[in-house]
Each structure stands twice: as C-alpha cells, then as structure tokens.
Amino acid sequence: MKTLFAQTFTAFLLSLSLLLLVVISLFLFGIRRSIQDWNVYRDRSLQGVIVPQLQRLYRRDNELTNDTVEAALTQFLTDNHYVYVLDPDREPLFMYSRGENIMLEGEEAIERVLVNLERSREMQRAVFDGEQLIAYISSGTTGFRSDVANLRFLRSMFTTVGIGVTVSLVVALVAAFVFSSYVSNQARGLASGLRRLASGERHVSFPRRSSRELRTIAASAETLQSRLEQEEQLRRQWAEDVAHDLRTPIAALKTQFEGMLEGYIKPDSKRLEALFSELLRLEGLVNDLRELNRMESPEMTIEPKEIDADEFLCEIAGTFELISTQRSIQFVTNNALDTFVADKRLLARGVGNVIQNAFQHVESGGWVSLDVYPRDGYTVFEVSNAGYVDPEEIPRLFDRLYRGRGGSKRHGSGLGLSITKAIVELHGGTVQMQQQDHTTRVLLQIPRTPPAGGKAAPADARYVVVDRR
C-alpha cells in the first residue's frame, strides 16, 4: 500500500466504514429507545384502562370476581397483552396472556404464572378504591415485536436502511475511486516531471489543474527547474572563465620556460621577475577561487560580534594608506555609528575588495570614500569613487571572474566582488550598485543583528542604475 492511490482509497474506505458504523449504531440505538418508549407507553396506557374498570366493578359489586373482571377487561385486551389481577391476599382473580384466560387452564398453569411473577420481581401495582385495597395488578405487552404490524414495520425499515447503506457504499466507493485516481494521476504527473528533471531534462511542464498543495509543488518544481538552468549556465560559464584565466598565464609561463630550455630566451633577473609575477597571479586566482567556494558552501558560517566602528574604519584606512599616497588618490572615511554587529574578519575582506576595486577604477588625483551609517534596521557600508561604470556592465560586475571592459589591463582575479557579495549574503544582507552623474557607489547592507551562524536565505544582489550625465 505504497501508492498514493492505495493510500487515498484506503483512507476513504476506512472513513466511510467508520461513518457507516456510527450511523448504524445510532440507528440501532434509536430503534431500541423507540421500542422501549413504545412499550412503556403501551404499559401505562393499558394500566390507565384497567385500574378505572376494576374500581368501577368494585364500587358496583363491592367485590371482584373472575367472571366480572374477565367481562370488563377482555374487550380492551389483544393477543399481545398480558394482565394478572390478584386479590388483596394475592390470590389470583384473573390471568390473561396472549389471548387466553389462564384461569381456565387449571391449577398447574396458574401456579406457573405465579412462580414466574415472583421470580421476575416485577413490581405489582396496588389498586385502591378510596383507602380500600381492592387488588394487585401486573400488566403490559408481550413486546413491540409480538405485534405482526410492528414486525412488518421493523422489517420494512431495516430493508430500506440496508438498501440505503448499500447504495451509499457503492456511490461512496465510486467517488473514492474517481477522486483517488484523480489525485494519484496528478501526483504521478508531478513525480514523472521530477524524475525527468532529475535525469537532466530542463523543459519539463508540470500539471497545474489540481489541489492547492499540488499546485504549490508544481510551482516549486518549475522554480527549481529555472534555477537549475541558471546554475548550469553559470557553472558552464564559470568553467569557461576559469579555464580562460588559467590558460593565459599558464601558456605564457610555458612559452617562456620552453624558450629558456631551448636557449633562445635568456633567463635574466627581469625575465624571472616577470615569470614570478605570473605565478603570483596564478596563486592569487587559485586562492580566490578556493575562498569563494568556501564562502558559498552551505557549511560556511559567520561569527558575528560587536565591532567598534571607528576602530574598524581606522584599520581600513591604514590598509589603503600606501596605495592612496602612491597614486595620489584621496581616501576619506565617514562614520555615523558607535558600534555594529558583524564577522569582523569577513566584513573587512568584503569591504576591502570593494575599495580595492574602486582604486583600480580611479585615475590619479581622484578620490575614494567609505561611509558607514544606519538605515531602516541595516548597517550600510557605502563605497564611492569618482568614475563611471557603463550601465550595461553593472548587472555583471558581481559575477565570477568578470573584470569589466578593459579588465585584461588590470591586475586581479575578477573574484573580489563575487567574494564580497557572498560575505554580505552570509550576513543576511544585500548588495547594491548605483551610478549617479560621475560617481559610482557600492552599498553593502547588513542587518543590525545578523543571523547567528549565517543561516539566513541568501539575498540576491540588486543593481540600481541612476545615470545623470
């Protein structure tokens, strides 16, 4: 019973069986109570007729005899009645059951009735005429089922109920079969689509004409399919970019080493220094690839702590003091916070990557600034620089290995901004890039209280282009 159809159909069957059991139990209980009420009513009605007759006879004759009692009561009695009348000394006066006068059957029959009355401990009603005790009576019906009409009524009712239950069961089973088939077919379609998706297909359509839950699963599967396509495309592009960025320095190193081995390139210090520079570039690329892979892994966590904002900015300023002096680029910091919460080591790496990228795009005599301020529950690190970024490039600047137009003339692996984006997302934040007039701004926004362990769902980078040239 592992299929959805079997489980759904079985659930319907069990629910229906339980419902029928409850309905039948209530029906039988109702019939039983009705019969009991009928018996009580008929017993009271019979006594309501017998007692006045006995009182009338006693007032008329000043005594009760078998003949007078029989003559007075038989007109009210039927075959499913019994009436036992005893005198004040509990001697039988009149005994009637199932249409027969037991007094005519002899002493043995009378004795048997008296014994049965004593054994049954049935409460005998005392009949008075004023304050005078004139008799004891025990009366009633032999039961609802002793009446032929009542039996026919019960049989008719049970037959009707049985037919109704049977028809209801058949209809319910058909409905359960149809519904279970419908649900299982929808689920089977989803399962088939997911299997095709797992096997590598990327243009799978999922059924939407089903319950809300199954439609939600279908929508999630389509979203998964779209993301898988994007991830596969990014992975292919990633592999091509890595191969390209590794191929170039490796080819250069290979060519020059072959020349030195064959003797037509002289291994002087300048040549070796250039080769060493290429090796450093390769080492930096490999290290950055490893760092980015670590940042984007599900196991990566952060250790957020309270950080002194002034101290953090001083350390950042000290890191870029030398390059600022060498290239005559003004670097300023502005702070509007006392403290903030973040993983200091990772955040310094992320902010440093953006500032490093800004210095690479600023000509000598330009400026770069870092502003830290609160906004809407976030801590914002805004890196600005004099320069211009083509709006068409902005959406790709945080892609892996992308260095922008003319990037081959600049040093770097092209992974710095990707690492920054991964660090910010670990903090549960977002990345924005804006171009306004001749100023480029990159905004790193992290929550005032980053999620412990960096387990928040990653936020997509957002790129806002405001071009007012």
Image (cartoon, grey):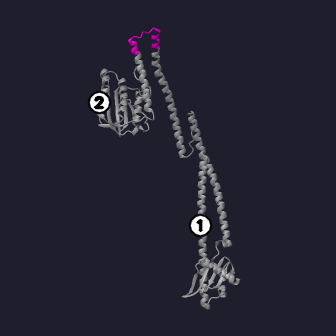
155 above or below 368? below
Asked if the residue at tag 2 contacts the one at tag 1, i.e. Cβ–Cβ closer than 8 Å, the answer is: no
Q: Earlier in the sequence, mark 1 or mark 2?
A: 1
Q: On residue 30, which mark appears?
A: 1
User: Is disc 2 surrounded by few (<14), some (14 to 19) or many (20+) residues within 10 Å?
Assistant: few
Relative to 331, 213 lies left or right: right
Q: For the view shown, which residue lies furthest in the top direction?
A: 264
Mark 1: amino acid: Gly
Q: Is residue 437 visible?
A: no
Q: Is residue 370 visible?
A: yes
For disc 2, the marked residue is: 314
Position of the C terminus by quadrant = top left
Q: Inspect the magenta stretch and tell me whether residue 261 lies in it.
A: yes
Judge the density around disc 1: few (<14), some (14-19), many (≥20) Cα neighbours within 10 Å.
few
Which residue is more in the foreground, 408 or 240? Answer: 240
Depth order, front residue of 262/376: 262
Q: Secondary structure at mark 2?
A: helix
Write the start and end of the magenta stretch as one range. Answer: 255-274
Residue located at (62% from left, 83% from top): 85
